[in-house]
Each structure stands twice: as C-alpha cells, then as structure tokens.
Image (cartoon, coloured by chain):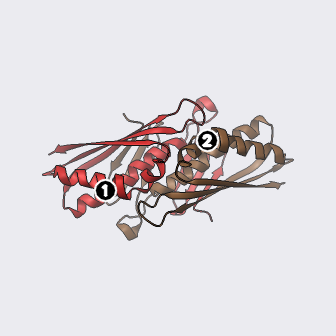
Chain colours: A brown, B red
Amino acid sequence: MPEARIKYTDGLQFVGEADSGHAIVMDGDTGVGGRDTGLRPMELLLLGIGGCSGMDVISILKKKRQDVTSFEIGVNGKKADEYPKKFTEIDVEYIIKGRNLSDEAVKRAIDLSMEKYCSVKATLEGTAKINYTYKIIQE
Amino acid sequence: MPEARIKYTDGLQFVGEADSGHAIVMDGDTGVGGRDTGLRPMELLLLGIGGCSGMDVISILKKKRQDVTSFEIGVNGKKADEYPKKFTEIDVEYIIKGRNLSDEAVKRAIDLSMEKYCSVKATLEGTAKINYTYKIIQE
C-alpha cells in the first residue's frame, strides 16, 4: 500500500487513508458541486503546519519543564489570485497559556520548530512565505 | 477566527479545525511520545495532494461524460534524511476504472489538474518534485 490512498466515493467526496491507519473525508464546497461533508484539501496544509509545529513546540516546552495549561495555534493562508491559486503566504500564531512561563523558553521552542525541525513548514516554504508570531498568557 | 485553529489536548494530540467547519485529530507515533490517535501532520500533505487533484480530475471527466466506475489515487512521499526532513519527491498514481474510457480524456484531465489547477500540487512543488502516472482499467 502507498503511504496515502485516496478513494473516490461520489460528488466531490474522497476518503483519504494514510499509512498510520487513520482516515479522513475530503469534500468540496456546495458552490462547486461538493456536499461539504469534509475538509478541503488546501485546509489540510494549514492544519498540517499547525499540528507539526505544535508537536515540536509542546515537546520542547515539556522537556524544559514549562507549565503549559493551554496551547492553541491559529493559521491563515493567503492564496494567489490566479490558478493554480497556490499559497503564497502563511501566517502562524501561537497562543500559549501557562504558569511562570519563560518568554525565552517559549521563543526558543518556536524558533527551533520553525527553523530546524518542522517538516511541514520546510516543505511549504518552497512556495509560501511563512510568518510567525506568538502570544504568552501568564495564569 | 483564523482559517485553521489547532488546539492542543494532551500527549502529542491536537485537534485541528478549519474554516469549512470540519475537524480532525492529529497525533504522533507511540515511539515519539504520541498515542497514535490520529494522522501525522506530514500525512496531511499527501492526502491533500491526492484529494485536490482527485477533485479536479473527476470534475473534468464528468464534464467529458466519461463513465468512471471507480477512482483511486496512491501517493508516496520521499523525505530528506536530515532535519527538517521535508518532502523532496512525491509520486502520485491515478487508477481509473470505467466503461469505454478515453485514454486521451483521462490523460488530459490529469495533465490539466497537475499543470494548471491543483493548488496543493502548486504549493508543494516549490520543494518537492512531483511525479505522476496513471493506469486505466476498462470494465
């Protein structure tokens, strides 16, 4: 089996199954003939960069014994106007809440992910400029 | 709300929610501290290119009144050995089954998707070389 198998059902709906054994439904907008039963393929890229970097950042912060109580990442993508309407810019915002968080530790964890470890970011940045900011909320 | 919001739960598990209103679970392998409850972020890129191009291809083939009875896409990604282990090459294989399928129509639909319409392909090809092949099975 290939690493990912995408099987057509009907309309614009596809079920994608990956090597890890997990599956998702993808579908198009009702405006283009889909039934909106699942994620748009382009949304997967935004979720992917957030999840990938999020896993790096939380792993590093745990190793640094930072007491994170909540962690959320917002991702916005800007597409080209012309076909194939690729992402030209992606903004990632990390919002980290915790007790006695070290600003230095948080900044370092995010920089390490974005500049060294995050495979999704490194794949997307060949086309899209990736910007990132973070917000720390002390509890 | 941003187009995608990725919220940390625990372990390496994140729930990603996108603008379309659909959500997925992402998680890491048990070998790296995850619980394998969801897709790996890098898998989302492979599913995304398959879903994106699949939607193009099936739309075009329907317009050309091709009688497709089954359609599947296999995607394999090759990663760099060194961090950030980005995708360097992605192979996409289309397997299209149908009645009286026109080889020319199928080839043209796939070429149009890959060379003109598919936003995910256009975003990933800044870093990864994208190869594609197709197989037609007449019923």
Count of numbered tags: 2
The reply to whether discs 1 and 2 touch (Cβ–Cβ < 8 Å) is no
Quarter of the C terminus of chain A within the rendering: bottom right
Task: Answer above or below: position of B135 versus B115.
Answer: above
User: Circle 2 sits on which residue?
Assistant: A118
Left-right relation of B20 to A58: left
Q: Around disc 2, counting alpha carbons within 10 Å, would you say few (fewer than 14), some (14 to 19), or many (20 or more)? A: many
Residue at (31%, 45%) from the top-left corner? Answer: B72
Question: What is the x, y in percent for residue A85?
Answer: 45, 61
Identify the subunit bearing mark 2: A
Res B112 label: 1
Which image quadrant is residue B86 in?
top right
Res A81 label: none
Q: Amino acid at mark 1?
A: Leu
Residue at (61%, 36%) from the top-left corner? Answer: B34
* Residue A52 visible (yes or no): yes
Q: Around disc 1, counting alpha carbons within 10 Å, would you say few (fewer than 14), some (14 to 19), or many (20 or more)? A: some
